[in-house]
Image (spheres, rainbow, N blue to C red):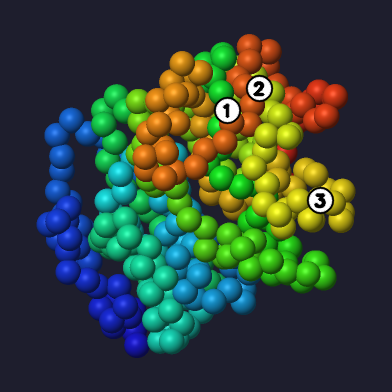
Amino acid sequence: MDEFDLIRRFFTRPPGLQTRLGVGDDCALLVSRPHRCLAVTVDTLVGGVHFLPEIDPVSLGHRALAVTLSDLAAMGAEPAWALLALTLPEADAAWLEGFAQGFFALAERYLVDLVGGDTSFGPLSVTVQGLGWVPEAGALLRSAARVGDWICVSGPLGDAGLGLKMCKGELAWSDEGAVARFLRPMPQVELGLALRGLAHACIDVSDGLAQDLGHILAASGVGATLVWDDLPLSAAVRRYIDETGDWRLPLCAGDDYELCFTVPPERALDLERDLQERKLAWHRVGTIEPQPGLRLRKGNQVLDFPPLGYRHFR
C-alpha cells in the first residue's frame, strides 16, 4: 500500500449530513449553521509519551478521537467533524484495520464525520483535529467561574493513572476497570451539552484535577478549596491509596477525561434534575473562593495544594 491506497481503504467513507464533501479532495466542504460558533481543537498523541508502544490499535484509534472529543465536551460543543494525521513506521494492514475500527466506532456514536487529514512515514504519532458547534453565547469557558460556585466533577478520579501503572507492571495486582479507563477513556459529550446554561466554567481533566482546576482558577481570577472526603474514588483507587499511602494520585494523575465544572448553588437543583433525567453523574468536590490558590481540606487540616499534574518538558 502507498499512502493513497491506505486512505481509500481504511479512512474513506460516504459523507454524513453535516458534510458536503469529505475525504479525497484538497479540502473538505462542511455544512454551516446560523447563530453558532465553530469550536475547533487539536491533539497529538506520540508513542512512548501519550500511549505505551504495545497498545492495541483498536484502543489507540478510540483514544485518539476520545481525547479530542473531550476538549469539545469541555466547551459544551456538539461534535461534528474530525481530521486525522497519521505518522506510521509502516503501512501494516492489520494494524490499520484495528485502528480504524476503534476510531470509527466512537465517531459513529457521536455522529462525527472524518473529513480529511494526512499520512506520513516516521515514528508512530496520531494527530486529531475536532470541530463542533456551540451556540454563540453558550460556550463553557475556563474564565467564567464565580466566587461561591460549587466545584463538580463528572466521575471517578485517578483510575486512568492507576491503569497506567498497571499496564507498566508497576503493581502486583490489576483491575480491569482501571486499565480500561486508561486505554479507552470515554469523552463526556452528553454532559458537556447538558451543562449549557447551567454551569459557569468547565475543563476536561486530562492532566490531573489539581492542575486542570488550576487553569480555571487562573483564568477566572479566583481560588478554591477541595474536600478530600467528597472526591469520587473507585474501589481500586482506594485500595491503591491504602496500600501505598499515595493519596495524591486522584488529584494529580492525568488521562481521566472527566469534566470539572463550576455551578452556582442556586442552579444545583436544576442541575440535579436535568442530569438525573439524562442518567448522567456528577459530584460536588469543593467551592470557588475569593482567596487565590488551591487548597485541600483533608480531615481536620486545610493544606495548600499546588496545581500539580502532568506537564511536557518538566
- Pointer 2 residue: 224
Q: Quadrant of residue 226?
A: top right
Q: Are marks 1 and 2 in contact (CB under 8 Å)?
A: yes
For marks 3 and 1, the one nearer the N-term is 1
- The residues tagged by marks 1 and 2 sit, at their Cα atoms, a distance apart of 8 Å
- Name the kind of residue labelled 2 in the image: Ala
Q: Quadrant of residue 181?
A: bottom right
**Label 2 crowd (10 A; few <14 / some 14-19 / many >=20):** many
**Label 3 crowd (10 A; few <14 / some 14-19 / many >=20):** some
**Residue at horizontal 52 percent and vertical 38 percent from the top:** 282
Residue 278 x, y percent position in the rendering? 37, 43
- Pointer 3 residue: 241
Residue 252 x, y percent position in the rendering? 71, 44
For marks 3 and 2, the one nearer the N-term is 2
Secondary-structure class at tag 1: strand
Kindly identify which numbered label has been placed on residue 309: none
- Name the kind of residue labelled 3 in the image: Ile
Q: Is residue 111 visible?
A: yes
Residue 275 x, y percent position in the rendering? 41, 37
In the image: residue 95, left or right of residue 255: left
In the image: residue 296, left or right of residue 203: right
Kindly identify which numbered label has been placed on residue 151: 1
Of residue 258 and residue 17, the one placed in the foreground of this image is 258
**Residue at horizontal 46 percent and vertical 61 percent from the top:** 64
